[in-house]
Image: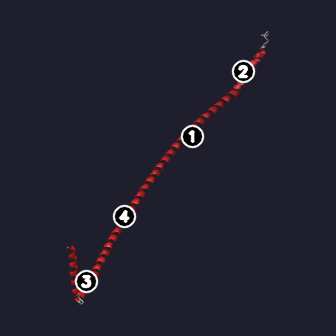
């Protein structure tokens, strides 16, 4: 091999140097790089698991938030419905009281009107009786002295006038 310019001792030393370099590179470079890549892969996998847990927690939080909002909506609707029922009940109570008071006022007004009518009739009858007595006194030319005579005369006069209207 001398003709090719290859020297065996040099070739052998280069092969040994190459093998030593491969062994050293494998020990100091290849294994640490593989370990570093494995650790990085593990960290990425852990980060992916953590991200999935966070995503699941976020979904659960959103679901819980939706439940709370729905519950709040239902409660607000119930409160509105209760307020409406209470307002209607109050309105009915007010209407009932107003109707009761109006009825009482009407009844009182009717009673007052009836009393006024009776007083007016009594007063009118008294005035009619007084006028009848005065007219009788003038006709007879004397005063009716006894109270019983006056009452009898008024009763007869009223009876005649009431009977005369019926004719």
Q: Position of residue 91 (x, y in %)?
A: 41, 60
In space, the residues marked 4 and 2 are separated at their CA atoms by 116 Å
Q: Which residue is mark 3?
A: 132
Q: What is the number of the mark on residue 99? A: 4
Q: Is residue 32 above or below residue 116?
A: above
Q: Which residue is mark 1?
A: 54
Mark 3 vs mark 4: which is more N-terminal? 4
| Quadrant of the image containing the C terminus | bottom left
Q: Residues within 10 Å of mark 2 (few under 14, many from 20)?
A: few
Pair 4/2: label in front:
4
Residue 99 position in % (x across, y down): 36, 64
Residue neighbourhood size for the residue with mark 1, other residues' Cα within 10 Å, grouped as few (<14), some (14–19), many (≥20): few
- Per the model, the C-alpha gap separating discs 2 and 3 is 163 Å
Q: Identify the secondary structure beneath mark 3.
A: helix
In the picture of the structure, the residue carrying the numbered disc 2 is: 19
Left or right side of 123 for 163: left
Residue found farthest to the front = 139
Q: Earlier in the sequence, mark 4 or mark 1?
A: 1
- Distance from Cα at disc 3 to Cα at disc 1: 114 Å
Sequence-earlier tag: 3 or 1 = 1
């Amino acid at each position: 091999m001398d003709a090719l310019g290859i020297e065996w001792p040099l070739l052998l030393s280069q092969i040994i140097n190459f093998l030593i370099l491969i062994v050293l590179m494998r020990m100091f470079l290849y294994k640490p790089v593989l370990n570093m890549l494995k650790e990085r892969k593990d960290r990425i996998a852990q980060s992916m698991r953590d991200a999935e847990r966070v995503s699941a927690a976020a979904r659960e939080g959103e679901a819980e938030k939706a439940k709370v909002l729905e519950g709040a909506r239902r409660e607000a609707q119930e409160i509105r419905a209760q307020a409406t029922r209470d307002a209607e009940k109050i309105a009915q109570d007010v209407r009932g009281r107003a109707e009761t008071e109006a009825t009482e006022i009407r009844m009182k007004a009717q009673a007052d009107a009836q009393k006024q009518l009776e007083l007016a009739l009594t007063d009118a009858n008294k005035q009619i009786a007084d006028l009848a007595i005065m007219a009788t006194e003038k006709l007879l030319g004397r005063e009716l002295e006894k109270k019983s005579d006056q009452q009898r005369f008024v009763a007869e006069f009223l009876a005649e006038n009431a009977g005369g209207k019926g004719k």
